[in-house]
Amino acid sequence: MTIKKSQLHPAKALARHLGGRLARRRRELGMTAADLGRAISVPAGSVSRLEAEAKRMDAVQLYTLSRALDVPMMYFFENSPVSLPSDLGHAPRPETVEEAVRFIDAYFKIDDPKVRRDILGLLKAVAGSEEESKPA
């Protein structure tokens, strides 16, 4: 029995779509899974699992893949069978996006994984304290 895309759980449908977009872009560039794996420092099998939606992509993987495949992160969501939430608020200011990209680039230049985890923990703590201090 074949399950139609429209019958899939939204998360599964999105995973299938993301994997398909990943495979399509990789092939467009003439890359093998091994080539892409080397470019993002993961085994070729990990790339294959992402494409086959056996492994879910997280935001960091999407960012890394978008850089390696020379596409914006939103490329992966184009024509998605799952509608994105409409309550995402207003679009961020361009300078905020540029600042975020510079931050992410700097973050990935940090070689020590413990330092990266500490920085992430600090960001979460600061973001959490700002949320708590907002009036209800």
Image (spheres, grey):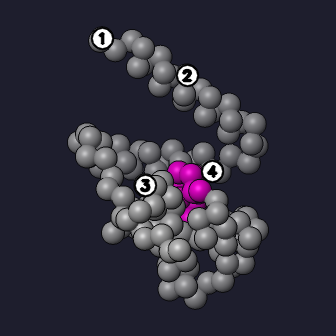
Amino acid at pointer 4: Phe
**Mark 4, secondary structure of its residue:** helix
Q: Which of marks 4 and 3 is nearer the N terminus?
A: 3
In primary-sequence order, the first of circles 2 and 1 is 2
Give the mark nearest the N terminus, 3 or 2. 3
- Identify the residue at the far bottom of this view: 30
Dot 2 corresponds to which residue?
125
Q: Which badge, 4 or 1, comes first in the chain's sequence? A: 4
Task: Locate residue 44 relative to residue 131 in the image: left or right.
Answer: right
The Cα atoms of the two marked residues, 2 and 1, are separated by 18 Å
Confirm whether the magenta stretch covers residue 71.
no
Q: Which residue is the site of mark 1?
A: 135
Please rate how many residues cluster around mark 4, counting C-alpha atoms within 10 Å: few if below 14, some from 14 to 19, many from 20.
few
Residue furthest to the left:
90
Give SS at disc 2.
helix
Mark 4 = which residue? 108
Q: How crowded is mark 1: few (under 14 residues within 10 Å), some or many (20 or more)?
A: few
User: In this rendering, does residue 132 appear at all?
Assistant: yes
Query: Given the image, on which type of amino acid does mark 3 rest?
Result: Pro
Query: Mainly helix, strand or loop, the magenta region?
Result: helix
What residue is rendered at 62% in x and 84% in y? 31
| Residue 99 location, quadrant | top left
Residue at the disc numbered 3: 10
Q: Name which of mark 3 and mark 1 comes first in the sequence.
A: 3
x and y percentages locating residue 98 in the rendered image: 39, 50
- What are the residue bounds of the magenta stretch? 56-70
Nearest-to-viewer mark from 2 and 4: 2
Dot in front, 3 or 1: 3
Mark 2 to mark 4: distance in Å? 20 Å
Q: Distance between the residues labelled 3 and 2?
A: 31 Å
Q: Identify the residue at the far front of this view.
A: 1
The Cα–Cα distance between marks 4 and 3, rounded to whole angstroms, is 31 Å
